[in-house]
Image (spheres, grey):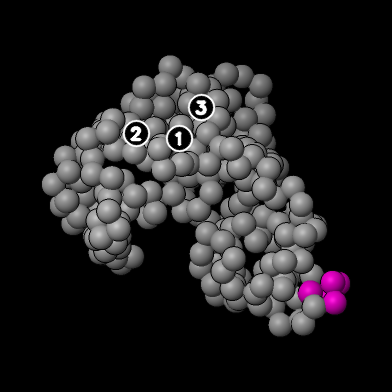
Amino acid sequence: MKTLRYKSYDPAVYLLEQILVKLGFPVVISNYFGKDTETAVKSFQLKHDLVIDGIVGVKTWSKLLAIENTLFNNTDKLLSEKDLMDFSKKFNLELAIVKAINEVESNGKGFLISGRAKILFEGHVFWKELEKRGISPEKYVSAKTRHVLYPKWTKKYYVGGEGEYLRLETAASIQKSKDFHDAAHASASWGAFQIMGYHYKDLGYTSVNAFVEAMQVHEREHLHAFGMYLKANKLLPLLREKDWDAFSRAYNGPSYKKNQYDKRLKLLYFKYTAKN
């Protein structure tokens, strides 16, 4: 496992924070190792007679994994080499391109420790989804719902991990109706590639429920949905042409240069080409 410490930004941090939450530590689950995580790690180290440095190296990982022995359940839901090869053939893409895209986009494991698909609930999208259904969201804002229903994007209410399911369930149960249920599930991003639920129709699913059910099955379903997203948005030709700049701009928007999305894709493509 990777050595992690304060300010580390890595998918492994998401896994670490899931474990800490399951062990009862109050941390926000994300890919960022913040002060809350450092405090939790130090508390864990103190409790288990480890060096109290806030760094998650081999010894701290070993103790965490020994205690959390259910960690590796549901590993039969993970992508395989064959899944990537099948995707490559289905969408007529070089395998090296598929592997590069997978490494950049999948952002770690697509399932939580519990076996449920990773999600992130977006309260501002929920607001818009209710409006699409002719519902005035303002009527339903209260102290109990303001963390799941708001007009503008904010990361303020993110909790990550299983906590995102609690937010989803809160939103869906504001009113017991199909509109609220569907709007809530359409307002979360799902799986390894974090595809928003409201895309379900463009991706070929008969309902948002059908999409959500597929996302709970296997990471290959996450990959399939991602492929259908690329197809629906006419992004596949840009990948076939290896036009990294045009693809990144179309997929990520004008801010793609800030995180060097195009450069990362290109370098990973060459890495996987060299391995073949």
Instruction: Answer whether residue 46 is magenta in the image.
Output: yes
For marks 3 and 2 on the same chain, the one whose residue lies earlier in the sequence: 2
User: According to the image, label 2 marks what residue?
Assistant: 86
Q: Up-down: is 96 above or below 114?
A: below
Could you tell me which residue is drawn at 67 percent across and 55 percent down? 18
Give the spatial CA distance, label 2 vs label 1.
10 Å
User: According to the image, label 3 marks what residue?
Assistant: 214
Dominant SS type (magenta): helix
For marks 1 and 3 on the same chain, the one whose residue lies earlier in the sequence: 3
Q: Position of residue 8 (x, y in %)?
A: 54, 72
Q: Residues within 10 Å of mark 2 (few under 14, many from 20)?
A: some
Dot 3 falls on a residue whose secondary structure is helix
Q: Which mark is residue 220?
A: 1
Dot 1 falls on a residue whose secondary structure is helix
Q: Position of residue 114 (x, y in %)?
A: 69, 42
Q: Up-down: is 240 above or below 19?
A: above
Left of 10 or right of it: where is 173? right
Asked whether 100 or 275 is in front, the reply is 275
Give the foreground label among 1 and 3: 1
Query: Quick one: quadrant of the N terminus?
Result: bottom right
